[in-house]
Image (tube, coloured by chain):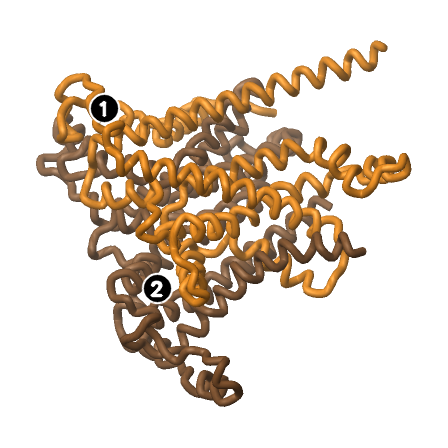
Amino acid sequence: MMRRFVLILIPYLWLFALFLVPFLIVVKISLSDVALSIPPYTPQLDLAAGWQGVKDFFSGLDFENFTFLTTDDLYWKAYLSSVKIALFSTLFTLMVGFPIAYGMAQAPDQWRPTLMMLVILPFWTSFLIRVYSWMGILANEGLLNQVLLWSGIIDTPLKIINTNTAVYIGIVYTYLPFMILPIYAALERLDGSLLEAAEDLGCSRSSAFWLVTVPLSRNGVIAGCFLVFIPALGEFVIPSLLGGSGTLMIGKVLWEEFFNNRDWPVASAVAVILLLILIIPIVLFQRNEQKQREAEG
Amino acid sequence: MRRFSWFNATSLTFGFAFLYLPMIILVFYSFNESKLVTVWAGFSTKWYGELLRNDAFLDAAMVTLKVAVASSTIATVLGTMAAYVLVRAGRFTGRTVFSGMIYAPLVMPDVITGLSLLLLFIGVGLDRGITTIILAHTTFAMCYVSVVVSSRLVTFDRSLEEAALDLGCTPFESFRLVTLPIIAPAVISGWLLAFTLSLDDLVIASFTAGPSATTLPIKIFSAVRLGVSPEINALSTIMIAIVTVGVITASLMSKRAAVKRAEDERAAVRA
C-alpha cells in the first residue's frame, strides 16, 4: 500500500509543483498591477504579515488588465487574427494532406512502411530548421522568385516573406504530418468491400469516393484538424520568422509584451484569455476521441 | 479493393516534393561558396569550417545535449511512473486532477508553459540556467512519455505479472523482470520523443534560460531573425543528417527485430 502511495505521489507532486502551481501564479499575476519593482508587479503575497497580509493581497487583485485588453485594439485584433490564421491554415493543411493520405492508403502494401517513414521523418527534424528553410525560398530575391522570374511567369518579384501568406505556407508545411497521419490511419482501416458494394449498386468511382470514403474518414479528418488548429493558434516561431510587422498572432504579442514591454501582468492576462479560447477546441477534440474509442469498442 | 491511380501517384509525388524540397535546398546551399545564400557561387565547405571555429555555437550545442539527456532521462522515469499510475493504480483521490495534469501540457501553447514556469522560478528565487531548463523540459516531456507508455500498458497482459508474483517475485522484481522488458520498446520511444522535443524546443527554453546557459535553438533563432545565413545552413545540414541516419537505423533495426521474432515463432512451432 505504501509502495502504491509513493508511486502516485512522486509524479503527482512533480506536476503539481511545476505545472499547476505555475499556472495559478499566472492567473494571480494577471490580476495584479504592474509596478516598478522586482519582480515588476504588486501585490506580493506576504505570508509573514499573517492574516492582514493575505487580506491585503486579495484586496489588491482586480480585473484591470482584462479591461485593458478589451480597450486596446491590438489585443482583440490579435486574438481574432490568430483564430483566422489558425482556421484557414487548418483548411489548407487538410486540402494538401488529404490527397497525400489517400494516395498512401491506395499505395501497394510493400511501399507503405517507406511512405510512413517519409511522413514521420520531418517530424523528428527540428521545427525551427523546417521553418527557417522557407526563409531562403520565399525571400524577395529568393529561390521561388528567381524561378518564377526566370520562367517568365512574373515580371516583378512577389512579396511573400513577411506577409500572412508566408505564415500560411509555414503552418501548412510544419504541421502537415499531423494532418496526414490520422487521416491515413482512418483510410487504411476502411473496408474495401464497401466500395465494391457501392460500385455494384451503380455508383461511379467518384461518387463512391464522396459517398463512402469521405464519410468513413471523418474521424481522422476531425482529429487531424484539431491537431493542426490547436498548436497553430498559439504559434510563435512561424509568425516571428516568416510573418511581418502586420502579422498579428497572440503568441507573438504575449512574447513581446513580456520580453520587450516587460509588462508581466498584461502578458499573464493575455495568456489566461488564450487558454480560455483554447478550451473550446480542446473539449471538442476530447469528445471526438472519446466517440471514436466507443465506436471501436 | 485498392487501385493506385495516376491521381494518387501525382498527389504523393507533389506531397513529398513539398515536404522534402525545402530541406534539400537548405542542404544544397550550405555548400555554397558565396555569403549570399540565394546566389550559387561554386562548391565549398568553408561554412562548416566557420561553424567548427564558432565557440558560441559549440557551447550552445553542449548545453542543449546536456539538457536533452538529463531531461529526457528524468522524464522517462517520471513518465513511466505516471503511466503506471494512470493505467494500474485504480481509483484514488485526485485522479481526475492527475490525468488532467498529464494531458493539459500536451495542448498547452509553449508561450504559456514558458511564461508560467519562468514566473514560478522567479517566485521561488531559483536562478535561471541549465537547471531551470532541465526542470521545464522534464515537466512537459514526462507527459508525452506517459502517453506513449500508457498506450502500451493498456494492451499488456496482466496475467504475466501475476504469474511472476505467484512464482515468488517481489512486486519490484516482477516489474523489472517481466513488465519492463515487455514495455521496453514503448519506454525507449518515449525517451527518444522526449529527447527530440528537448533538442527542438525554442520557446520554453527562451523563457527559462538565463544568461549563463543558452541552448542551440535560442542561438539559431537569434541568428536567423536577421535573415538567412550560410553558417546556419551548415548547422541545419548536420542536424538533418544526424536525424536521417538515426531514423533510418531505428526503422531497419525494428524491421530486423520483427523478422527475427517471426523466425523464432516459426522455430517454436516446428520444435
List the single residue furthest toward the left: A155
Question: In the displayed structure, would residue A11 be above or below residue A273?
Answer: above
Q: Is residue A215 visible?
A: no
Q: Could you tell me residue A29's position as x and y percent?
A: 41, 73
Judged by depth in the image, the label closer to the viewer, 1 or 2, is: 1
Vertical comparison of B184 with A8: above or below? above
On-image quarter of the N terminus of chain A: bottom right
Secondary structure, mark 1, is helix
Side (left or right) of A228 relative to B172: left
Pick the residue in front: A218 or A165.
A165
Side (left or right) of A129 relative to B157: left
- For mark 2, name the chain: A
Location of residue A153 (image quadrant): top left
Q: Which mark is residue A79?
A: 2
In the image, residue A274 lies at what x, y percent? Answer: 41, 64
Find disc 1 in the rendering and name its residue.
B49
Q: Residue, x 38% and y 36% (percent of image)?
A: B62
Q: Amino acid at mark 1?
A: Gly
Farthest front residue? A48
Q: Position of residue B148 (x, y in %)?
A: 61, 41
Q: Quadrant of residue A100?
A: top left
Q: Residue at x 40, y 83 (%)?
A: A62
Which labelled disc corresponds to residue A237? none
Residue at (21, 48) in percent of width and height:
A162
Question: Which lettered chain is shown in brown?
Answer: A
- Mark 1–mark 2 distance (CA, rounded to whole Å): 45 Å
Number of numbered discs on residues: 2
Circle 2 crowding by C-alpha within 10 Å: few under 14, some 14–19, many from 20: many
Q: Which chain is orange?
A: B
Residue located 43% across and 50% down the image: B133
Subunit of mark 1?
Answer: B
